[in-house]
Image: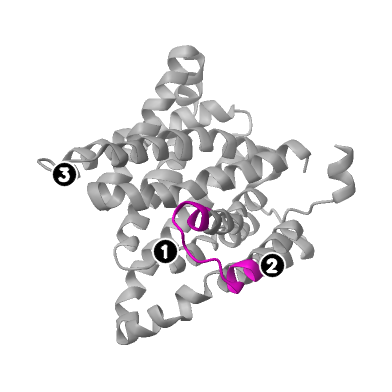
């Protein structure tokens, strides 16, 4: 893994962690489904700008429309909808733990369907990373808030299942990108996938939009930013990362995102920074180091 790929990896963690801030600002006003669909539409509109600058980016859509349809649906439209449903009754801490299952699911799919075996070091790193996420979110999972739910845990199983299905979608999209779209540029992949996803989500956006309600400028800024930066631009970098280092190592970014999310929560929202957050962050970073099969000497030389 080159130094450039590592910088991209952590830059993506930064960009996607901001999604938690955008969701907290925009979802209460737009609603979960409306916010998710508008996120896709703004991402698709952003990719149209890329097409206007260079129409050749549409060649990938003409050549690989079926594969890009799979990537668009499984990597954006379907997971966004499933996580929107899950977020209605599952707290953010539990969702973050579930989201961290993506690299393991990606590794399972790669191993079973594409014969892409993981080394023992990478497998150990992924497991350690997931343990770190559980430590990071242990207060949300096992603290007073979770205990107060009591018998309410059972009705949460179905929404948690929605979130896990969304994670499967992310893993499928990453493996399809790596194994079938290697000859396609990251921008071409993102253009095709987001335009198809936008067509699918357009009816949802029209139906679910909160007509008659006053939407604040802050909420509009949040949905535009999550669509443009945390989706469209981020996916261009993600698709490049998948091609460079593979779907399993690329999707291990989901292990690092909670660290940035907690940092922004502490700095921007005044949320508490406890011992669990610090210990969990250290464990996650160590697990990610192993799962990415990094070499400090190699990074210095690269």
123 or 42: nearer the eye? 42
User: In the image, 88: left or right of 206?
Assistant: right
Position of the N terminus, as image quadrant, is top right
User: Mark 1 — residue?
Assistant: 92
**Residue 280 image position (x, y, % from top left):** 63, 68
Magenta range is 264-280
Circle 2 sits on which residue? 283
Secondary element type, mark 1: helix
- Residue 272: % across, % down: 50, 66
Dot 2 crowding, Cα within 10 Å, few <14, some 14–19, many 20+: many
Does 168 lie within the magenta span?
Answer: no
* Circle 3 residue: 210
Q: Is residue 251 above or below residue 93?
A: above
Residue 124 on image: x %, y %: 73, 67
Residue under the image location 45 percent in, 69 percent down: 94
Q: Quadrant of the C terminus?
A: top right
Q: Circle 3: is it few (<14), some (14-19), or many (20+) Cα within 10 Å?
A: some
Residue situated in front as seen by the camera: 32 or 188: 32
Lower sequence index among marks 2 and 1: 1
Above or below for 18 versus 261: above
Compare marks 3 and 2 and give the one earlier in the sequence. 3
């Amino acid at each position: 893994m080159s130094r450039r790929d590592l910088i991209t990896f952590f830059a993506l963690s930064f960009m996607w962690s901001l999604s938690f801030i955008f969701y907290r600002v925009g979802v209460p006003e737009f609603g979960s489904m409306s916010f998710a669909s508008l996120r896709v539409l703004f991402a698709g509109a952003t990719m149209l700008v890329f097409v206007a600058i260079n129409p050749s980016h549409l060649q990938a859509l003409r050549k690989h429309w079926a594969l890009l349809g799979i990537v668009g649906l499984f990597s954006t439209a379907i997971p966004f909808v499933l996580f929107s449903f899950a977020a209605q009754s599952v707290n953010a801490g539990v969702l973050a733990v579930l989201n961290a299952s993506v690299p393991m699911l990606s590794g399972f799919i790669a191993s079973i369907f594409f014969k892409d075996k993981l080394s023992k070091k990478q497998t150990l790193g992924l497991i350690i990373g997931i343990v770190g996420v559980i430590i990071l979110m242990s207060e949300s999972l096992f603290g007073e808030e979770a205990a107060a739910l009591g018998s309410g845990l059972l009705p949460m199983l179905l929404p948690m299942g929605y979130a896990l299905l969304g994670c499967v979608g992310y893993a499928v999209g990453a493996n399809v990108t790596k194994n079938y779209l290697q000859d396609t540029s990251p921008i071409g992949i993102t253009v095709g996938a987001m335009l198809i996803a936008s067509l699918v989500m357009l009816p949802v956006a029209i139906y679910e939009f909160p007509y008659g309600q006053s939407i604040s400028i802050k909420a509009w800024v949040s949905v535009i930013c999550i669509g443009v930066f945390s989706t469209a631009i981020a996916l261009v970098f993600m698709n490049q990362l998948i091609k460079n280092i593979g779907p399993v190592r690329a999707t291990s970014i989901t292990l690092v995102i909670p660290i940035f999310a907690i940092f922004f929560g502490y700095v921007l929202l005044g949320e508490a920074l406890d011992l669990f957050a610090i210990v969990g962050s250290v464990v996650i970073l160590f697990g990610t180091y192993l799962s990415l099969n990094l070499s400090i000497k190699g990074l210095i030389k690269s």
